[in-house]
Amino acid sequence: MLEPYRHNIGHRHLEVGPGSGWYLAHADFSDGPAQITLMDLNPTPLAFTARRLRKAGHAVDEVVGSVLDPVPAAAGTGYDSIGINFVMHCIPGNFTEKGVAFQHLSRVLTAEGVLFGSTILGRGRTPRTLFGRFLTTAYSRAGAFNNSDDDRDDLETALTTVFEEHTLTDVGDVTLFTGRRPRQLT
């Protein structure tokens, strides 16, 4: 899971749903401290992750917002990279509905920017391990997972609609994705 950060993160980065910021804290910023904007609906992980990254010398901005809405103006534009890990399977609906998140995020990327992330697909996929099945069932019942209608074809269509180039890679129960060269959507 750390490899996408090591290969894709840019100097000006937007992280959606940063959680604890572990991946960002372990990413390779070989060009020195980065300008990182964190976006989440919940200010608590924003504040925690911001403190963690500031201690490492990064410039950090915090923005409260939903990926189902346009990125707030306070976040700015011109991002080299956007990370959105383990967020999409928590959003209600299928990729026809929640794929709008890719459209909103693509609008703040540079022309050569990359969006990368991960999700856990639901439809047509049974977790491979007993522990995976247990977690998926428990999180779905609790309302934390909303991925029962998520499948690979719909994820690919959502990415193709927004990006000229994309990749999908399955790693166990997780699907990693990237989108490059955002299309000019109206």
Image: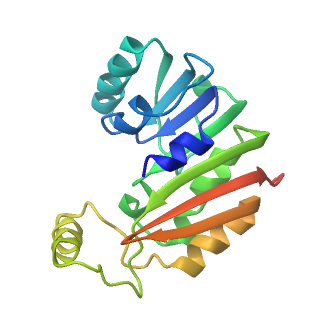
- Picture quadrant of residue 89: bottom left
Percent x, y of residue 149: 42, 79
Percent x, y of residue 158: 64, 68
Q: Please give left or right for residue 31 compared with residue 174 in the image.
A: right
Query: Is 84 above or below relative to 153?
Result: above
Query: Is 170 above or below relative to 19?
Result: below
Q: Is residue 154 visible?
A: yes
Q: Which color scheme did the rendering employ for the protein?
A: rainbow
Query: Is 7 above or below relative to 44?
Result: below
- Picture quadrant of residue 139: bottom left
Q: Please give left or right for residue 118 compared with residue 146 in the image.
A: right
Residue ID at (48%, 71%): 170
- Picture quadrant of residue 179: bottom right
Residue ID at (42%, 52%): 1
Given the current orientation, which residue lies at the most extreme bottom position? Answer: 124
Q: Please give left or right for residue 173 compared with residue 38 in the image.
A: left
Percent x, y of residue 93: 44, 69
Percent x, y of residue 5: 52, 42
Residue ID at (38%, 84%): 125
Query: Camera-side residue: 10 or 102?
Result: 10
Residue ID at (69%, 47%): 106
Question: How many numbered callouts?
Answer: 0
Q: Is residue 70 visible?
A: no
Query: Camera-side residue: 179 or 77?
Result: 179
